[in-house]
Image: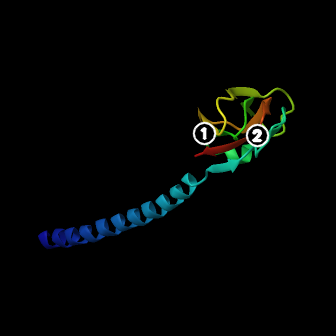
Amino acid sequence: MLKKILRALDFIPLTIAVVVTLINVFFLSSVDRLRAVEDNRVNAQLLNAQSAGGTSVVASAADMVRCRETAVYVIWSAGTSAGAVTIETADQDAFAGTWAPEQVVTWSAANKEDIYQITGVHRAVRTRISTAIVGGTVSTWIVCN
């Protein structure tokens, strides 16, 4: 009887080794899939050297779907002396109504960058020249992860 018990116990380490190996294989393949999701981020120029009031460009809901932290850079060119850019959000790219304002970034200095950071999930985000840029242009970039 004791021999039968000892033979059964010899089998246990082999069984544990197989289970541990299967867990490792599954875990390692899952980590690669998770890493691929983390690489979905946006780094895009919206406004490109624009000055006319009312000009806007949208970071689409398709682009923003995985963003949790967002930064919008507002770059004032040399020679600028006034103007404002409004950062806005809506539930869809083509929303025809009044978008929800996140921040109004008013001109602060020529040849300077301003940054506005947004935490949370947003669908479409746009930058719009809400006051015409005087004496130069403005560009905006959106970066998120």
| On screen, residue 122 above or below 66 | above
Q: CA distance from mark 2 to mark 1?
A: 20 Å
| Dot 2 and dot 1 residues touching (CB under 8 Å) | no
Residue receiving disc 2: 137
Q: Residue at x 43, y 60 (%)?
A: 27
- Kindly tell me whether residue 11 is visible in this rendering: yes
User: Left or right of 113: which side holds 29?
Assistant: left
Lower sequence index among marks 2 and 1: 1
SS at circle 2: loop
Which image quadrant for residue 6? Answer: bottom left
Of residues 65 and 25, the one nearer the viewer is 65
* Mark 1 Cα shell of 10 Å, populated few (<14), some (14-19), many (≥20): some
Across and down, in percent, residue 101 comes to 72, 26
Q: Residue at x 67, y 35 (%)?
A: 110
| On screen, residue 47 above or below 24 | above
User: Left or right of 13: which side holds 21?
Assistant: right
Across and down, in percent, residue 14 comes to 28, 71
* Amino acid found under the numbered disc labelled 2: Thr
Q: Residue at x 63, y 36 (%)?
A: 121
SS at circle 1: strand
| On screen, residue 47 above or below 81 | below
Of residues 65 and 84, the one nearer the viewer is 84
* Mark 2 Cα shell of 10 Å, populated few (<14), some (14-19), many (≥20): many
User: Left or right of 69: which side holds 16?
Assistant: left
* Amino acid found under the numbered disc labelled 1: Ala
Across and down, in percent, residue 21 comes to 36, 68
Q: Residue at x 48, y 64 (%)?
A: 29
Q: Quadrant of the N terminus?
A: bottom left
Residue receiving disc 1: 71
Identify the residue at the far left of this view: 2
Q: Which mark is drawn over residue 113?
A: none
Across and down, in percent, residue 44 comes to 68, 49
